[in-house]
Image (cartoon, rainbow, N blue to C red):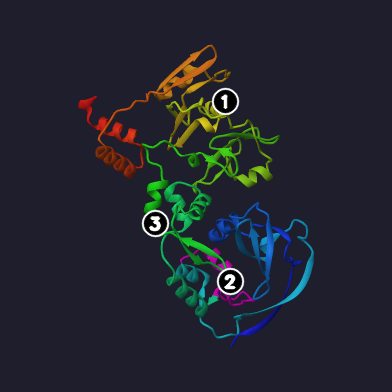
């Protein structure tokens, strides 16, 4: 037998249909990664209430542009009424100490469900499982009704299996936000599965991952793709310099989950983009955009991250050449740079051509009258082949994810007798 508890709660004044709202992050990535990235999809976006769902718990259906989300009351704000209290009675059933019910500890429930203890806690808050009350703290660990946990385990076992967006992001070397965008754009095939009340998350099968890996994961012989070093959402680039009145220098760095943020060298701390903007009021030290140069090939350099010239050279490239004219791939101890062939001023008080010339690995570099001249080692040419042979080469190059020119170059380099 369960005890019916009448709990009085205080919450903000409820919203109405048509009202404008914004998402509030009510958990961290560590606490509950699935909810965290569900929120992040709609962060900073303006939403409109299209439906109020009052049972079993106050929720709203919110439209963000073309997308919709179902969010709890405490996960929204309109920026005005955060502290306007109203009282209401929330009737719900929970186990209590006097009930003779079977139970699992929080750790046991987490192991059975394959989630963290923090996620089990949120399952209890969301009423997905029933937490057993222990007002006198007779047990060291929270407990949950066995029947409810078993039911949730059974439901999970019937769902598609595979990798989560977080796991796929780590394997591809991109951010989780990018994975969600690829799913929405159809670049990664994923199955939607229920998560919480009227929410969904995604599961990516091994086959779907392998298909995505071929098209999205850059190979060492391919030039870097823009998402490797540029966060288009926040208009920031890897190693870009920021500053504020309190912080003389901050650098854009990615954490272990490949999420772009800021590293503060003076206090050796990594911040999320939002923390850097709101708490430390960081601002870019220069614009990273310049008109794109004509495509006349690239010059390749490989620079050690530990060299004194590294950051000044990156600042120069972003400010003078712009992200439109460079490509960048981060390696363990070095950075591989592809710079469009062209001419730009080189007037730096920190370094000269002699400081960067040793890092040139492909192409030509000269300094004439204050101008840095870069010339590609490639030259456009053409030759005729039978259609059948050209189609075969095209298919083989496509399988490897490279251009026909690169495929021919690779094959010739393997047969040195022809060189």
Q: Residue at x 50, y 78 (%)?
A: 146
Main SS class of the magenta portion in the image: loop
Q: Is residue 282 above or below residue 203?
A: above
Q: Quadrant of the C terminus?
A: top left
Q: Residue 112, position in %: x, y?
A: 45, 70
Distance between the alpha carbons at the discs numbered 1 and 3: 41 Å
Magenta stretch: includes residue 239: no
Mark 3 element type? helix
Outermost residue, bottom side: 1
Magenta range is 114-143
Mark 1 element type? helix
Label 1 sits on residue: 320
Distance between the alpha carbons at the discs numbered 1 and 2: 54 Å
Q: Is residue 346 above or below residue 216?
A: above
Single out the mark in the foreground, 2 or 3.
Answer: 3
- Quick one: 5 or 225, which is closer to the camera? 225
Q: Residue 73, position in %: x, y?
A: 68, 66
Q: Residue at x 51, y 55 (%)?
A: 184
Q: Earlier in the sequence, mark 1 or mark 3?
A: 3
Q: Is residue 59 above or below residue 367?
A: below
- Quick one: 369 or 254, which is closer to the camera? 369
Name the image quarter holding residue 50: bottom right
Residue 252 visible in image: yes
Q: Residue 328, position in %: x, y?
A: 47, 34
Label 2 sits on residue: 124
Label 3 sits on residue: 208
Label of residue 62 in the image: none
Q: Earlier in the sequence, mark 1 or mark 2?
A: 2
């Amino acid at each position: 037998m369960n005890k019916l508890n009448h709990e009085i709660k205080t919450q903000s004044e409820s919203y109405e249909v048509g009202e404008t709202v914004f998402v509030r992050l009510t958990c961290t990535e560590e606490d509950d990664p699935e909810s965290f990235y569900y929120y992040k999809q709609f962060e900073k976006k303006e939403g409109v209430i299209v439906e109020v769902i009052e049972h079993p718990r106050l929720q709203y259906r919110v439209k963000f542009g073309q997308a919709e989300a179902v969010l709890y009351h405490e996960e929204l704000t309109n920026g005005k009424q955060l502290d306007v209290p109203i009282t209401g009675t929330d009737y719900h059933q929970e186990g209590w100490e006097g009930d003779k019910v079977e139970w699992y500890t929080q750790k046991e429930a987490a192991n059975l469900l394959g989630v963290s203890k923090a996620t089990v806690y949120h399952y209890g808050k969301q009423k997905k499982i029933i937490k057993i009350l222990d007002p006198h703290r007779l047990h060291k660990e929270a407990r949950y009704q066995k029947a409810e946990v078993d039911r949730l385990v059974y439901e999970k076992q019937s769902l598609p299996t595979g990798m989560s967006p977080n796991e796929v992001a780590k394997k591809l070397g991109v951010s989780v936000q990018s994975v969600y965008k690829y799913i929405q754009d159809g670049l990664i095939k994923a199955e939607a599965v229920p998560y919480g009340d009227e929410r969904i998350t995604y599961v990516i099968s091994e086959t779907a991952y392998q298909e995505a890996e071929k098209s999205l994961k850059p190979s060492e012989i391919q030039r870097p793709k823009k998402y490797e070093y540029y966060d288009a959402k926040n208009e920031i680039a890897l190693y870009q310099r920021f500053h504020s009145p309190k912080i003389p220098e901050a650098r854009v760095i990615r954490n272990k989950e490949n999420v772009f943020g800021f590293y503060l060298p003076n206090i050796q701390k990594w911040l999320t983009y939002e923390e850097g903007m709101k708490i430390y009021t960081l601002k870019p030290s220069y614009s990273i955009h310049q008109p794109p140069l004509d495509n006349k090939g690239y010059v390749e350099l490989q620079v050690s991250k530990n060299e004194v010239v590294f950051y000044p050279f990156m600042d120069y490239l972003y400010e003078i050449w712009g992200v439109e004219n460079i490509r960048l791939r981060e390696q363990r101890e070095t950075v591989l740079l592809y710079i469009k062939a062209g001419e730009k001023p080189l007037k730096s008080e920190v370094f000269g051509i002699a400081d960067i010339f040793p890092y040139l690995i492909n192409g030509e570099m000269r300094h004439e009258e204050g101008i840095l001249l870069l010339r590609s080692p490639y030259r456009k040419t053409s030759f005729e082949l039978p259609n059948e042979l050209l189609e075969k080469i095209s298919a083989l190059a496509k399988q490897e994810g490279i251009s026909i020119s690169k495929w021919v170059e690779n094959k010739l380099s393997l047969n040195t007798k022809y060189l």
